[in-house]
Amino acid sequence: MGWVKRVLAGAIGAIWILPGATAFAQQDPSADAEMPAMKKALGGLFDARSEGNDASAAVQKHIDELSDQTDALLAKYRTVLKQIDSIRIYNHQLRELITSQEEELASLQDQLDRVEVVGRSVTPLMLRMIDALDATVALDLPYLIEERTQRIADLRKLMTRAAVTSAEKYRLIMEAYQTENEYGRTIEAYRSTLKRGDRDIKVDFLRFGRIALVYQTLDGMEAGVWNQVKKTWEPLDASYRTAIREGLRIARKQAAPDLIRLPLLVPGGGTS
């Protein structure tokens, strides 16, 4: 069996010289007896090589699988690193935002503290403003008395409401002042009742700013003017009826603005 060992040692060479060996065996009658053993050994060699190739293929497949898994893990690792960087940047931004909000809260708290101090000072001022407005209405011509006194009453009630901010209270008071200011530079006509003794009569009132307040009955037969010094109504002669009628039309925008004759208070309490 010495030749078998030589064949196993030089297996690859034996494969390539197999045709020559076969021819030699055919020429050497002593080799005929050894041919089956040689074929068996070569068959085992081929089987071993095939098994080795199969094993190598399996190992390579396993290596490929491990490589794919490694690539997948590496890609996931890189993705996680990017997410970590994004979270780090986001957390930094949040810290800056929280710091800014804390500073803003501190500023707002400081403003609230100052508002309380200002509120304690503004409230008495607003009350004095309402009192001054009330005094103005009392000393003014007696036009739209119900409307103006109701506005002041609403302001006084407003000052007792805790749900209304000081800023809103101040705004409404200033609106009332603006309304009163408008009365001084406008002309207005309105219909209301005039108390005459024990009865009330319907009349048309005509206000010229704060200069004059006159009235005329609906039939146009009677007219009068308010005497601010005597705090009473004084009758007007018939010469004023046309002017008052024209003033009512102008105030109601039924006629174009024009010059009209007004009864004005003169020193001594009379009218001219």
Image (cartoon, rainbow, N blue to C red):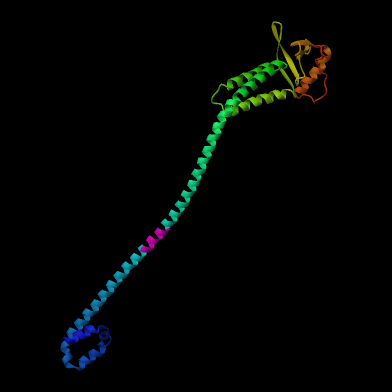
Q: Quadrant of the N terminus?
A: bottom left
- Picture quadrant where residue 162 is located: top right
Where residue 87 appears, x then y in whole percent? 45, 51
| Looking at the image, residue 106 lies above or below residue 64 | above
Q: Which residues are magenta?
A: 70-78
The quadrant where residue 25 appears: bottom left
User: What number of labels is visible?
Assistant: 0
On the image, the x and y values in percent for residue 109 come to 52, 35
Farthest residue, direction bottom: 27
Which of 214 and 47 lies nearest the eye of the viewer?
214
Q: Any magenta on residue 192?
A: no
Query: At x 22% / y 85%, what residue is drawn?
Result: 7
User: On the picture, is 7 further left or further right than 91?
Assistant: left
Report the front residue among 69 and 227. 227
Percent of width and height locating residue 233: 75, 11
Residue 219 relative to residue 94: left or right: right
Q: Vertically, is 21 above or below 111?
A: below
Residue at 29% from the left image edge and 72% from the top image edge: 56
